[in-house]
Amino acid sequence: MRIHRLDPDVVSKVAATEIIGSPVNALKEILENSLDAGATNIEIAVKDGGFKLLQVTDNGDGIDQEDLAILCERHTTSKLKTIKDLETMDTLGFRGEALASISHISHVSVVSKTKQARTATRAEYEAGKMTSQKPIAGVQGTVIAIEDLFFNTPSRVKALKGRSNEEYQKILDVVCRYAINYAGTFSCRRDNSGQPYVIAGATAKDKIRRVYGPSVANDLIEINLEGDESIGLKSVSGYVSNADYFSKKGANFIFFVNDRLVSSEALRRGIQKLYSQYVPKGAFPFVFLSLKIESDRIDVNVHPSKREVRILDETEVVDTVVAGIEHYLSNQDAGRKYKVQSFIASSSMPISSVDRPTSAQKYEHHLVRTDPQQSTLTSFARTPIKPRENINLPPSDEESSESSSIPPSNDHQVLEFKPMALASIAALKQEISDHSSTKLTKIVTNHSYIGLVDVSKSLAAIQYDVRLYLIDYHEMSLHLFYQIALTDLANFGTVSLGDGLAIAELLEISGKDVKPPPMLLTMAPMLQDYFRITIKEKDDQMVVTQLPLLLENYNLPVARLPDFFVDLAQLEWADEQKCLGGICMALAKLHQPVAPSASEIETILNSAKRRLVATNQLGSSIVEIANLPGLYRVFERC
Ligand code: ADP
Ligand code: MG
C-alpha cells in the first residue's frame, strides 16, 4: 500500500479528539482558561451532558478584541513564549491548543470584554478560523460557548452515545474539585434546570462540606506542612479525613500540584497504604491536598489533557507528604489514646515514651515491611483457619455500629454519680499503670501484623522495627478488652439481642450449677447505665436484651455468653471496686475471640495498637523470635 499525506482537516480532527476525549476534557480546558484569567465567579451551563452545550461565563481579565481573530488558531497563547518558560509555568494552560482543538470538533462562540475595552465583542469560530465578529453590549469577562461537540466525528459520538448522565457527573466532579482549591464562587446549571448547583464558601473546608456533606467535613484534619527545600517541595496544605472517618464508597483523592488538578498514582498509593494502618479494612479516606513545588522541578507537559505531571524526586516528595500526614494522624491517635493513658498520668511511663510512628518511620520500599496490607504469612499458610464455631449475633442496631462514640442513653433512671469520677475505677486504672511496661507497649503500638502462626495456640506473628515477635492474641485481647471496658465505661456501643435471652437457660447451658442472681435485677439500672447491659423481667423470667460491644466491627462470640453470666453470678456486689472490676473482666472474657477469622485478629491487633497499655503480665505473651541484624549476620545479606 502506498503512503499518502493526510488531509490537514483529518490531522486536526485526530489531534483534537486526542486532547478532547469527552465533554469533561473540553470543560476542564475552558474552566482552566477562566482560572488563568483570574476569574472569581464562574458560571457553567451544560446541556445533554455537554454534547449539546458547554458554556463557561467568567469575570476574568477578558480577551483583547484584537486577539480574537487568532484565538482558535493552533498554538496561539498569551502564556508561553519561549521553551524556557515551560520550566516556570504558573498558568494552567500554555500550549495554545485547547480552543483550537475544540473549534475543529464543535461550534465555538465567544463574548469577551477587557477592562479597557468600550464594548464587548462577540466572535464565532469554525475549524480554527474566526467566521464572524461584532461588537455587543457586555461586562468585563468572557463567555465561551461550545455547541454540538463531536458533531463532525461520528465515531466519537457513537462511542459516547447515551452517556449524557455520566458525562454530566464527571463535569460536576471536576467543577467541584476546582471549586475546593480555588477561592471564588462556582456554579453549574444542567439543561436549564431551575436552580444551579452553587459551590461557594469562605474556606476549602466550607466547600468540602457543601460538596461532600457534613459527614466528611466533620471528620477532617487540616494539614499544613512546611516544605523541604532539598526536594523543591515548598508547602503542602489541605484537609484529610481522620481515623474516625469511615467511608465504604471508595477513596476520594483530590490532588493539586501548583494549583493544577492532577491524578497521582504514587501519592494515592502511599496515602492509601498509610490509612490502612489507621482505619478498618474496607474503609476509605477523603484526601484533599495542595502541593506547591518549585516549578522547575515539575514537568506539566507530559499528558495530552495535562492530567498528570512529572515530579523530580517523586518518591521523596511522596514520602515526605505521607510522613507529614502520618504525623497528624498519629497525633490524633495519641489524643484518642489519652483516654487510655489518662489513667497512667501519674505513672512512670510518660505518654511521650511510647513511640508513635514518626516521619522517621521506614516505608515498605525501604527494606522493612511495615504495611499490613502486603501479603502476609496467612496467605501462604497451609492449615485452613477453622470455620467460626460461634453463631453470630443478629446484626447490631444502628446505634451499635457507632461504637464508643455514642453517648450513654438517657432513657433510664439517672444515677447520682458520674462513673468516670469513681474512685474505684481510678484505682483499677492505677493498677494497670503500676504494672505497665514501656517496652511491651512500644512493641504493640508500633507493630506491623504479619500473619497467623498457630490458631490452636492463638499465636500471631508481628514485626516491630527489625524484630519479629510471636504474640498470644487471646491473652492480649483479654487485657485490651478489660482496658477498653474501664476506659469507655458508660460509653460503649451496643448489640441488641432482640426479644432477649433467658438468663436461666444460659446458665443451664454453662453446665455449672448456678441460678440467676436476683442482684442482677436490683442492679439493672447500674448495669444499664455503666455497662449498657439491659436486664429485664419478662414472664417471670430474667432476660438480657442488650449487651455492650467494646470494639466496632467485631462479632461478639455468643458461645461465651453462658460463662459471662456465671461470672456475673459470682460477683461481690458489696465491694464497689471488686464489683465494677469484675464486670469489666467478665466483659473482657466475653469479648475474647472464639476461632477468630484472620481479619478479626487484625481488627483486635489494630485496636491494641491504638489503645493497649501493655503490662508486665503480657511478658510471656509477646516473645521475640528473630531479629534482622541477627539474620544479616547469619546470611550476610539483606
Ligand atoms: P492556552 O490556555 O494553552 O494558552 P487556549 O487555547 O486554552 O490555550 O487559550 C488560548 C488563549 O486564549 C489563552 O492563552 C488566553 O490568552 C485566551 N483565553 C482563553 N479563554 C480565556 C478566558 N476565559 N479569559 C481570558 N482569556 C482567555
Ligand atoms: Mg487553555
Image (cartoon, rainbow, N blue to C red):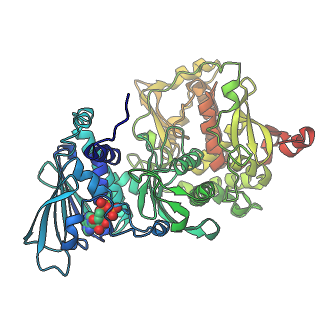
User: Picture coordinates of residue 286 (x, y %)?
Assistant: 45, 51
The answer to whether residue 32 is seen in the rendering is no
Q: Residue at x 25, y 71 (%)?
A: 60
Most foreground residue, 139 or 212: 139
Residue 421, quarter of picture: bottom right
User: 382 and 244: which one is in front?
Assistant: 382
What residue appears at the point 57 percent right and 60 percent down from the top-left corner? 328
Number of numbered discs on residues:
0
Residue 609 percent location from the top left of the image: 66, 47
Quarter of the picture containing the N terminus is top left
Is residue 600 visible in the rendered image? The answer is yes
Query: 69 or 235, which lies in front?
Result: 69
Quarter occupied by the C terminus:
top right
Q: Which residue is drawn at 32% across and 57% down?
A: 97
Give the image location of residue 13, x and y in percent: 28, 45
Q: In this view, does 526 lie to the left or right of 323?
A: left
- Horizontally, residue 606 falls left or right of residue 499, namely right
> Camera-side residue: 630 or 216?
630
Q: In this view, does 50 lie to the left or right of 84?
A: left
Picture quarter containing residue 67? bottom left
Which percent across, then down, holds residue 537?
43, 30
Vertical position of residue 63 compared to residue 191: above or below: below
User: Which residue appears farthest toward the front when viewing the image?
Assistant: 2
Q: Is residue 34 above or below residue 443?
A: below
